[in-house]
Amino acid sequence: MTIKTFTAATAAAIAIGTAATAQTEIQFWHAFTGRLGELVAAQVEGFNASQGDYTVTASHKGNYSETLNAGIAAFRAKEQPHILMVFEVGTATMMAAKGAIKPVYEVMAESGAPFDADAYIGSVKGYYTSADGEMLSLPFNSSTPVLWVNKDALSAAGIDPATDLSTWEKVGAVLDTLKASGHACPLTTAWQSWIHLENLSAYHNVPFATKDNGFSGVDTELAFNAPLQVKHIQTMGDWAKDGKFVYKGRRNEGGADFRAGTCALFTESSAGYAGIKSEAKFAFDVRPLPYWEGVEGAPQNT
């Protein structure tokens, strides 16, 4: 998932000191576990070893929601970290937290560090940029929802592992075959609201909320009870009743089942690659998130 922080480097900056002294300590709170946690630890260790002026202390504070809540509680207690990783679902909370965060464009300008916001992919940059074009947070571990495929499971069901899965109609046909072959978990997902409502809407160029999806004002109303979203959720519900979609939990509980080879198809963040590559004992593939046929403007970026 896309991550934001709040200070010098990656987004909302919960107040950091300015003058650098020998071994200035920088507190960095994050939500990474597993292989991503190992990579972040290596990144921090590499930075600390590269110079002697600053020491970054990284602390894992739980899952995405727990890390966000920990940052909010720490700010209220005046014990906030310098940098806080926040997942994209917390974007609105951080954008509204004036006085609690320091936008990354201000941090970069004050530090004199070279910074080119246009170096980021447009859709990534736009997500963390204000309506007047200023980047508020620094994308870190930015990701997009994708479809992960257990190629061995497809082969075992008599399905060509290279079969076209670009649309939900085609995915449905593959689920029929997997279920008929006796597969116990043809499809599961992580982060259902993020993938199957928010990104579903963006991918099909359909509003998720009013006011430019919340970027043009705080008096925003959710707008996902439209025909496309209703159709998609109804389809997922029907697949669940038929045993073709298996609900594993609200967050990423389905990830362990896919990595273990239990589930054949899995919608999750592209950031899941590190864990899947590390743990999967089967041939796997990654595909773009499927879209519904016949929707004008689809697919576009998630």
Image (cartoon, rainbow, N blue to C red):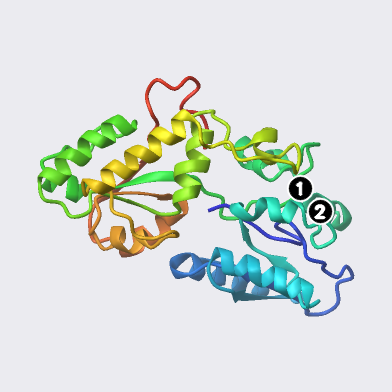
Residue 207: image location, x then y, percent: 58, 32
Q: In this orientation, which residue lies closer to the viewer: 151 or 68?
A: 68
- Residue 98 is marked as none
- Image point 70% across, 34% down: which residue? 211
1 and 2 marks in contact (CB < 8 Å): yes
Q: Amino acid at mark 2?
A: Met
- In the image, residue 227 sits, relative to residue 25, either above or below, namely above
- Image point 18% across, 39% down: which residue? 176
Q: In this orientation, which residue lies closer to the viewer: 50 or 232?
A: 232
Q: In screen coordinates, is 122 left or right of 34?
A: right
Gap between marks 1 and 2 measured at Cα: 7 Å
Q: Amino acid at mark 1?
A: Phe
Q: Is label 1 in a helix, a strand or a loop? A: loop
- Residue 69 placement: quadrant: bottom right
Q: Earlier in the sequence, mark 1 or mark 2?
A: 2
Residue 50: image location, x then y, percent: 67, 71
- Residue 145 placement: quadrant: top left
- Image point 70% across, 38% down: which residue? 118
Res. 150 in view: no
Q: Is label 2 in a helix, a strand or a loop? A: helix
- Across the whole image, how many numbered discs are drawn on residues? 2
How crowded is the residue under tag 2: few (<14 C-alpha within 10 Å), some, or many (20+)? Answer: some
Residue 282: image location, x then y, percent: 22, 56
How crowded is the residue under tag 1: few (<14 C-alpha within 10 Å), some, or many (20+)? Answer: few
User: Which residue is tagged 2?
Assistant: 108
Q: In screen coordinates, is 225 left or right of 53?
A: left
User: Which residue is tagged 1?
Assistant: 115
Residue 222: image location, x then y, percent: 60, 40
Q: In this orientation, which residue lies closer to the viewer: 275 or 241?
A: 241
Res. 38 in view: yes
- Image point 37% across, 24% down: which residue? 293
